[in-house]
Image (spheres, rainbow, N blue to C red):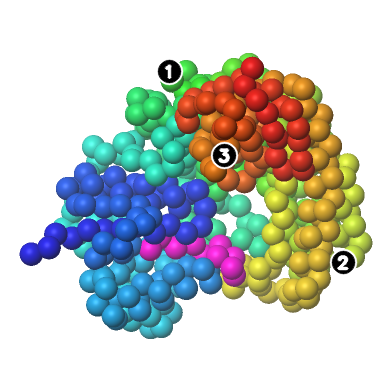
Amino acid sequence: MKKDKVNIVTLGCSKNLVDSEVILTQLKGNGINTDHESKKDDSNIIIVNTCGFIDNAKQESIDTILRYADAKADGQIDKLYVTGCLSQRYKDDLEKEIPQVDSFFGTMELPALLKKFKADYKHELVGERITTTSNHYAYMKISEGCDRPCSFCAIPLMRGKHVSRPMEELVQEAKNLARNGTKEILLIAQDSTFYGLDIYKKRNLAELLQRLSDVEGIDWLRLHYAFPTGFPLDVLDVMAERQNICNYLDIPLQHGSSKMLKLMKRGTTREKTESLIQTMRSKVPDIAIRTTLIAGHPGETEEDFNDMVDFVEKMRFDRLGIFTYSHEEDTHAHSMEDDVPDELKQERANHVMQVQEQISRELNEAKVGKTFKTLIDRKEGGQFIGRTEFDSPEVDNEVLIDATKHYLRIGDFAAIKVTDATEFDLYGEPV
């Protein structure tokens, strides 16, 4: 009898990727032959870890499930399991619509998923994780869920209330990662600034950063998804004093108009946001700030949009992404009329990106002639591709180095002098 082989397919964000890595670690720990995103078509059991964040992501998840449902109907695979955010949010509908799926699991149902494989949830594997990214960097989820009431966001529906992971567990996980060759840890959460409020009764992100910064072998710690309201300023002091904490912050701000921030239930104003960014830049002078914005939230007028453009021009963010608003049921904004037409949402998003492109080009051109510590991520075609401390994988700028002229090792740091720059990339050579 042929032995089972499992393939895990991950959609959505880095938080989902960590969940898939935990499933992978648990299944392998139970002796089950498991792959992640296997290119070979030799798995007879598929687990799809879905995203339910916005329309496009939901559509991609559904298309992926349907593709495997067809494969099951054709006898190419034996079992199909679905987990993750979409499954958490729409389980009943999905069970009716796609009966070929053997079982649907929510975001908190890992033990139930493992039972399908007659596998036990191994507590001794907590903090151990097989990473699916390149060995030299790994994501680490410091908390789960979110208590924020943002009007547009369905995350609390899918991920539940905010729950911090104990510091000891995170430090142990960082030590395990370092032992396996990880040099960069990217801290992620729905809202990293809430870290510790539930278990330590105070915002404890600064102490967590200190403790992780002490772990031997970790060269870079990178902080993602900070919420601007009530941002713990002691984090900036730790960032400034610790060499191995990247001068980088991913802080989704969502809008530049006070009226829109109020409609979005963000608990802050444009003035407060600008003042916070100035504080960040004065405490950590060379900090790179990445943000994300939303175009076309219900109630956004031309004037509100112009406010956002003005905000982007004035703040000169190092990195910026923008989403078009997606009308999600069961969110507060769903009770409002989705009154900005799709084409206009897209037009507005494109306009913001054009403004950002110019800013990004100017900031990058200012780096020409300077030398940066660069982590070499991969080789592609005739180029080595790396990142400076001011860039996160897959979303930010990259440093391109001619591989026909220079030899670098993937996963190593190199001192790279920037010789040229475009709006989203740097070109350089080792010094």
> To which residue does mark 1 refer?
216
Q: Residue at x 48, y 27 (%)?
A: 409
**Mark drawn on residue 301:** 2
Kind of residue sitting beneath label 1: Glu
Q: CA distance from mark 1 to mark 3?
A: 34 Å
Query: Which quadrant, please, contains the N terminus?
Result: bottom left
Q: Nearer the viewer, mark 2 or mark 1?
A: 1
Q: Is residue 52 magenta?
A: yes
Kind of residue sitting beneath label 2: Thr
Q: Position of residue 413 (x, y in %)?
A: 53, 23
Q: Nearer the viewer, residue 177 or 282?
A: 177
- Label 3 crowd (10 A; few <14 / some 14-19 / many >=20): few
Q: CA distance from mark 2 to mark 3?
A: 47 Å
Q: Position of residue 292 (x, y in %)?
A: 70, 50
Q: Nearer the viewer, mark 1 or mark 3?
A: 3
Q: Nearer the viewer, residue 188 or 261?
A: 188
- Badge 1 or badge 3: first in the primary sequence: 1
Query: Which quadrant, please, contains the C terminus?
Result: top right
Answer yes or no: is residue 366 visible: yes
Note whether 348 is above or below 396 in the view shown. below
Over which residues does the magenta segment extend? 48-57
Q: Nearer the viewer, residue 83 or 134?
A: 134
Q: Which residue extends farthest left?
A: 1
- Label 1 crowd (10 A; few <14 / some 14-19 / many >=20): few
> To which residue does mark 3 refer?
382
Q: Residue at x 18, y 60 (%)?
A: 4
